[in-house]
Image (cartoon, rainbow, N blue to C red):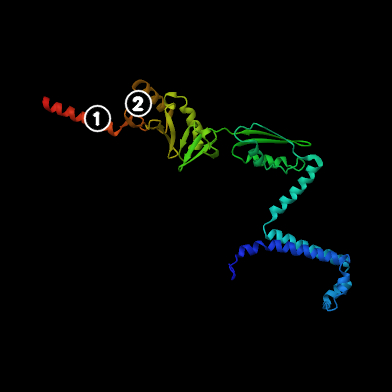
Amino acid sequence: MDGAGRSNRSRRSSEPKTDLKAAAIGAVVLLREYFGFDRKRLKAAPDRQPPSRAILWLERYTPRRAVLMLTLATLLGSAVLGVFRGGHVDAVLTQLADGRNALANSAGFRITSVVINGRKQLSQDEVLGIGGVNGRSSLLFLDAATVRDKLKANPWIADATVQKFYPGELQIDLVERKAFALWQQDGRLAVIAEDGAVLEPYVARRFVSLPLVVGKGAETRARDFLALLARYPQVHSVTRAAVFVGERRWNLRLKDGLDIRLPENDVGNALAALSRMDKEDKLFSRDIVAVDMRLPDRLVVQLSEDAAKAREELFKDKKKKKAGDA
């Protein structure tokens, strides 16, 4: 802030405009003097101070055209410096590009037809916006390679081909990634592809039926594990989420809240055992909260609080009966 309460930022932001304005005024004045528009006005100013010796020497020994060109170059350099200092390069380039496209459009190279093939998740407006194609673009000056690179930078697009058919047709062929699963990390949900690429934050209800994987590293390991899990429909059908623990092994969270702690190795055999125990003993319907399969030689089952209390009371009753019989 200066003494009058004005911010330095606002004063700096006006400098490029001032430089450009001063340069334009200087160029107009110089041209008017060169073509003789102000000669009469100069003669009518008798009180004007005589120029310095340096100016007189330049006027005498330097050709007038060279002085004019030097002055114009100085003014142009000042204008360019103002543009760079003010951070207006992008705006100037955009205006130049718009002007170039306007000339091409008026010459008959306006984009009048757009064909987009392979589009499923993205709308046509989204594809054109990603590629940088708008209503001012002309087919003549459209860089197909640049549009393709912009499209491929979008996570939904695995590959793209851009073709121009003169005078006004643009064709874009897309290969989109498919939404594979939902990935939860640090409380945030995202839609991921098979290769683990994050496609977008989870906001659309159309992805609600995707399988859920949780934990660091789960996004890159989900494809192989979910493919293995799908081989055991007895377990897969009741699984709500697969949790990747310590970037080493998986846990299953079933729809009724039951936790299945799978081993780090021989996961297929553990899933087969789970499927068999549910078929034979209705394991998933019992009053338990966790099944620990991490030890290779035993299965550890954790009862719910109610089941644990009931089991404890049952043991107490058995002890009392034994004591009475004795």
Q: Which residue is mark 1?
A: 311
Which residue occupies 47% across, 28% down?
A: 228
Q: CA distance from mark 2 to mark 1?
A: 17 Å
Q: Is residue 13 left or right of residue 70?
A: left
Residue type for callout 1: Arg
Query: In the rendering, at what x and y percent does residue 243 appear?
Result: 43, 36
Residue type for callout 2: Ser
Q: Which residue is mark 2?
A: 285
Task: Using the rendered view, name the quadrant where residue 36 is placed.
Answer: bottom right
Quarter of the image for the C terminus: give it.
top left
Closer-to-camera residue (314/296) = 314
Which element type, helix, strand or loop, lies under badge 2? helix
Query: In the rendering, at what x and y percent does residue 160 appear?
Result: 66, 36
**Measured along the vertical axis of the image, is residue 35 above or below residue 175?**
below
**Measured along the vertical axis of the image, is residue 30 above or below residue 310?**
below
Query: In the rendering, at what x and y percent does residue 225 appear?
Result: 47, 31
